[in-house]
Amino acid sequence: MTRNKFLKQLNNQLQFFPTEERENAVLYYMEFLDESENIAETLESLPKPKEIAYKLREELGITVNLPYDTQDGLLKRYSLVKETDGKTILLQLLFLAFLSFFYFTTLNLLSAFGLPFKVIDEDTGVFIVENVPTFLSLPVIVFAFLTIGTKKGHFSILRAFNFEALLLLVLSLLALRLLILPQLWDLLPFTFEMEQRIYEQGYRSPLDKFYTAVVMNLLLNFHPLDMFFYFVFCIMIPFHVIGATIQRKKSKFWLKVPKGAL
Amino acid sequence: MTFTVAGKLLDACVLGIIADKDTYGYDLTQKVSFSFEVSESALYPVLRRLSKEGLLCSYDKSFDGRIRKYYHITDLGQEKLEFYQEEWEIHEKTIKSLLTGGVQYDKKQIFKTAE
């Protein structure tokens, strides 16, 4: 690792620190490296930037480890992102579950648009649904899983979502949906008879069956207005992610490395 | 070294070194690690904390085209250092009496020594 790489990594690792703290720390290590007689050797002996950041965070009593905690404007603008001190794994898993479900559903729906997803079975007279291959949503789930766990890269904004706000948003939209289109009430509880009729061939796990039932009920009772809700989900979240990313890139503290310092 | 120097003791050592002569990060680390093992990353938090507490102040000084951040002890830091020195003397005696044996069960003796 070179001096510049080390400093950049350290800077990235300290991105959750208040700007002044981060600058002081990076400058300290920059000076430290520049003063040492053998930079390569010193770099070897120094702990990894990640470890330094971890230690500093502990010792400086900075418990906030989520991005953008110091960017007031961003917090105000993107209300879904809030200042918070580390959420539990449970919350992350819940969020992951939500994301998986969301992506799964969206993908199914989007795929369905290109397919005849509402078909009347001539023999039985019931609606049947073209099955969208499940494996299509697998990469999305993996993606969601990976991005939730990582701190690196711009996807880390996912970690900074205000879970309560997100949940509230989803619930209120759902409530609105029920108010506007009350026939959705009829879907509760979801019936499995239809699902059984269509998927009686071949083994499917109970969870898969349940999920299929949910998706199918949504498809069978799909209303143009539902597009609005899906659009909100499809556009809103990417909007927050992209918007916050741009903000972050703009406010990034770039190291000023003097010429010929190496 | 078998015994680790950390916490307040490390604070005191850093104060002592800086009280002797104004110094910068790398030099300080060299001086400290000359006497006992300390990781490079351990000193930055100490310096930062001492500065925040007003025990140290810093100034920039250019050297060979670079800028060094020198740390200087404040009056408050000097007071603190004297306090640490007194405390250390007591501590040293206490530990010594414990280590050399004989008095470790005599609490009164330890307290007397401590006084």
Image: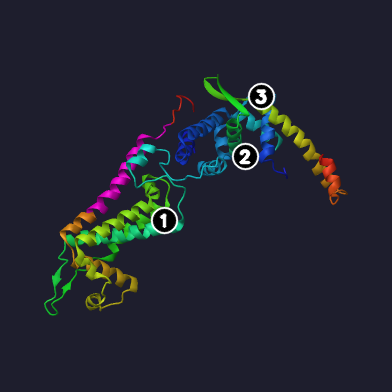
Tell me the chief SS of the magenta region.
Answer: helix
Real-space Cα distance between discs 1 and 2? 34 Å
In the image, A56 versus B88, the foreground residue is B88
For the residue carrying disc 3, how many other residues have a C-alpha within 10 Å: few (<14), some (14-19), or many (20+)?
A: few
Q: Amino acid at mark 1?
A: Gln
Image vertical order of residue B77 relative to residue A147, above or below = above
**Mark with earlier residue (3, 2):** 2
Would you say residue A227 is visible in this rendering? yes
Q: Nearer the viewer, mark 3 or mark 1?
A: 3
The residue stretch that appears in magenta: A231-254
Image vertical order of residue B71 relative to residue A242, above or below = above
In the image, A134 versus A5, the foreground residue is A134
Disc 3 chain ID: B
Residue identifier under label 3: B75
Q: Secondary structure at mark 3?
A: helix
Residue identifier under label 1: A92
Real-space Cα distance between discs 3 and 2? 28 Å
Q: Quadrant of the C terminus of chain B?
A: top right
Query: Is residue A253 located in the magenta-colored stretch of the structure?
Result: yes
| Quarter-of-image position of residue B96 | top right
Real-space Cα distance between discs 3 and 1? 49 Å
Q: Residue at x 32, y 39 (%)?
A: A246
For the residue carrying disc 1, how many other residues have a C-alpha within 10 Å: few (<14), some (14-19), or many (20+)?
A: some
Q: Amino acid at mark 2?
A: Ser
| Quarter-of-image position of residue A202 | bottom left
User: At which x and y percent is residue A91?
Assistant: 42, 57
Image vertical order of residue A119 relative to residue B114, above or below = below
Q: Is residue A243 left or right of residue A260?
A: left
